[in-house]
């Protein structure tokens, strides 16, 4: 098994950009991951239209996007799909991904950094076969993420009632369609997430642990001030 370096950097509300930069520098620097002319896909946790710690702090997303642009990225894409439980498409609510992104300030981040926003629900899906899949033998995955030269995962540190924690691995539950999220969402969900990661490549993880969540996550837990950025 390969050994990965993990950076844990103390930061503050006033120095989030510096904290993100230090964390990435500690694992090789942004230039080790992003080259001139590449397309970079950022995958934050935008599961609900509610602020951190339920979702990734937009200031962390802004910092990563700016660093990618400074490294010469031709295009930076920010994409996700919010929780299926309140989606209009499933007849259970009125959310759209675009509305959730607007509520969270992600559209503003994209405008400020010259990035593009992708709504997975209105974009294309590519069905990928999973070698040695246990729960999933194949799965549709957001095409914009598969097509990118570089994928950067930007989760928030939360507790989770079904997977104990919601970190980098769990964050990729948002890259599949809503009806696939609904399936195998009980005891099988951890293996389901492992299966997804068999066919998705991640270049860098930058974790928002500025304000983490403990208790009944991923939605009803309480905030915990940590002032940390992690990278690996």
Image (cartoon, helix red, strand yellow):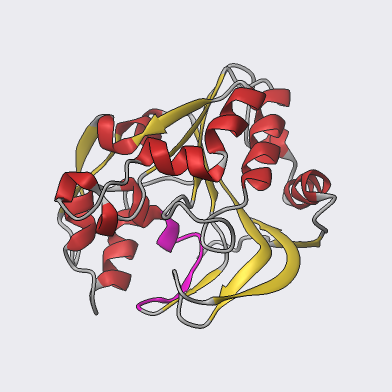
Q: Residue 164 versus residue 169: which sits nearer the camera?
A: 164
**Residue 142 horizontal side relative to residue 154, left or right:** left
Placement of 137 over or under 125, stated as above or below: below
**Residue 95 visible within the image:** yes
Looking at the image, which residue sits at the far front? 94
Report the residue at 63% width, 31% height from top: 34
Q: Image height check: is 29 above or below 31?
A: below
113 displayed left or right of 28: left
Taking depth in this image into account, of 70 and 58 the one nearest to the observer is: 58
Q: Position of residue 104 (x, y in %)?
A: 53, 45
Instruction: Say if 86 sits above or below 18 in the image.
Output: below
**Image point 32% across, 46% down: which residue?**
95
x, y percent for residue 105: 57, 40
- The magenta stretch is 162-171
- Frontmost residue, 33 versus 181: 181
In the image: residue 94, left or right of residue 197 = left
Which residue is located at x 65 percent, y 25 percent?
113
Between residues 216 and 35, which one lies in front from this camera angle?
216
């Amino acid at each position: 098994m390969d050994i990965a370096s993990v950076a844990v950097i103390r930061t503050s509300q006033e120095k989030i950009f510096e904290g993100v930069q230090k964390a990435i520098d500690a694992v090789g620097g942004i230039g080790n991951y992003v080259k001139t002319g590449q397309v970079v896909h950022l995958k934050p946790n935008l599961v609900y239209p509610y602020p951190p710690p339920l979702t990734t702090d937009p200031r962390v997303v802004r910092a990563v996007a700016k660093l990618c642009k400074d490294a010469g990225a031709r295009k930076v894409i920010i994409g996700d799909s919010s929780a299926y439980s309140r989606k209009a498409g499933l007849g259970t609510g009125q959310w759209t991904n675009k509305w959730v992104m607007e509520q969270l300030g992600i559209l503003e981040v994209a405008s400020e950094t010259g990035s593009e926003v992708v709504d997975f629900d209105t974009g294309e899906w590519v069905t990928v076969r999973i070698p040695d899949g246990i729960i999933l033998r194949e799965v549709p995955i957001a095409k914009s993420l598969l097509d990118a030269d570089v994928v950067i995962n930007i989760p928030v540190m939360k507790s989770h009632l079904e997977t104990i924690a919601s970190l980098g691995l769990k964050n990729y539950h948002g890259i599949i369609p809503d009806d696939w999220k609904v399936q195998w969402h009980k005891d099988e969900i951890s293996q389901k997430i492992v299966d997804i990661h068999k066919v998705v490549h991640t270049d860098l993880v930058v974790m928002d642990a500025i304000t983490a969540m403990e208790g009944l996550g991923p939605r009803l837990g309480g905030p915990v001030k940590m002032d940390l950025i992690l990278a690996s």
